[in-house]
Amino acid sequence: MLKLDRVSKVYRVGSFGGEQLRAVGDVSFEVRPGQVVSLIGESGSGKSTIGKMVLRTSRITSGTISFDGADISRYRRTGELKEYYRRVQGVFQDPFSSYNPVFKADRVFEMIRTEYFAAVPAAEWRAKLDAALRTVRLDPAQVLGKYPHQLSGGQLQRLLIARALLLDIELLVADEIISMLDASTRIDVLNLLADLKERGLGILFITHDLSLGNYVSDQTVILRGGSVVERGATRRVFANPLHPYTRRLLSSVPQLHKTWAEVDAELRARDAGAERRCAYHERLPDGGPDPLAAVDEDHHVACFALDGAPCPDAARTPVG
Ligand SMILES: Nc1ncnc2c1ncn2[C@@H]1O[C@H](COP(=O)(O)OP(=O)(O)OP(=O)(O)O)[C@@H](O)[C@H]1O
């Protein structure tokens, strides 16, 4: 469904845009129908930039993003874009910023109605809206007609997901959608995503939180400094992290039943000096759509060289 092939993004920065910042470099991965793919990385690793490129609110510098085989950067006509947004929508971190406080919250549905359902009779529209709200576990009578300040963050976020669902979308880009919600609402929204996935929706779940990624996703993509360091089936990446960066990220997740010293000792014992060598350098593909080495059918890892530093496996020549 969604496929990224060596996608890069360079921003022009500096006072006159004379400098360049490579926010995303050579990123490749796929999202299939009914699959949740987590894009995990620390702040500034390029997650949101990838989401924006998928949603076409930020231009790709190089590489290709395709949806059902069609290169999305080639959509020029309004009709093509409109059709794309009927199939692909995004929901973002701060639900409050998507609402104008002086209007009732249900105004967010009006744009969808004007754009896509102008010919639909009022009663039919209302039935469709009620169905979308019930899918996200909202009671229409409880939420419609209210102002944003009269609703919780979780309710506002679910209204936005309902808006996306009205379009029968196939792919949802969910960018940090639960980081501003309280713990119990988080679980509600996560379970909602699981329901949507069961209905065949593909979800690109952007998060800096490893445990959330582990909870919801089938596939995991670990980003560092704009590049993918490791990618694969979530259970494989979490059970057997191969890249030193992934290992460090995982070891920094608090484990309530263990002390930091125990976690650290386990990590050292497991790695036993292996971090100094890039075990996968020789297996990196020479060109092709994916810059990572395939370790397993569903587990890929990058060279251990990071940020342009030489490959730690000094015996060999670093790539790129
Ligand atoms: N419009 C822009 N112009 C210039 N640089 C940008 C722009 N947007 C993002 N960046 C830079 O690109 C890099 C990646 O940013 P991005 O927002 O994609 O990261 P992120 O992983 O989503 O971070 P966070 O979790 O903090 O949202 C950062 O260094 C950021 O400062």
Image: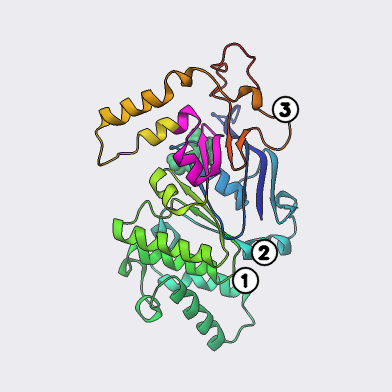
* Secondary structure of the residue carrying numbered label 3: loop
For image coordinates 61% across by 59% down, the residue present is 33
For image coordinates 48% across by 46% down, the residue present is 235
How packed mark 2 is, by other alpha carbons closer than 10 Å (few <14, some 14-19, many 20 or more), is: some
Looking at the image, is mark 1 or mark 3 earlier in the sequence?
A: 1
User: Where in the figure is residue 274, as x and y percent of width and height?
Assistant: 47, 20
Looking at the image, which residue sits at the far top? 315
Q: Name the residue under label 3.
A: 286
Q: What residue type is labelled 2?
A: Lys
User: Where in the figure is residue 290, as x and y percent of width and height?
Assistant: 67, 36
Q: Name the residue under label 1.
A: 115
Q: Name the residue under label 2.
A: 82
For image coordinates 63% across by 63% down, the residue present is 87
- The image quarter containing residue 171 is bottom right
The span picked out in magenta is 219-246
Estimate the spatial distance between the alpha carbons at disc 1 and disc 3, rounded to whole Å: 46 Å
Q: What number is the disc on residue 52?
A: none
Q: Which amino acid does label 3 sit on?
A: Asp
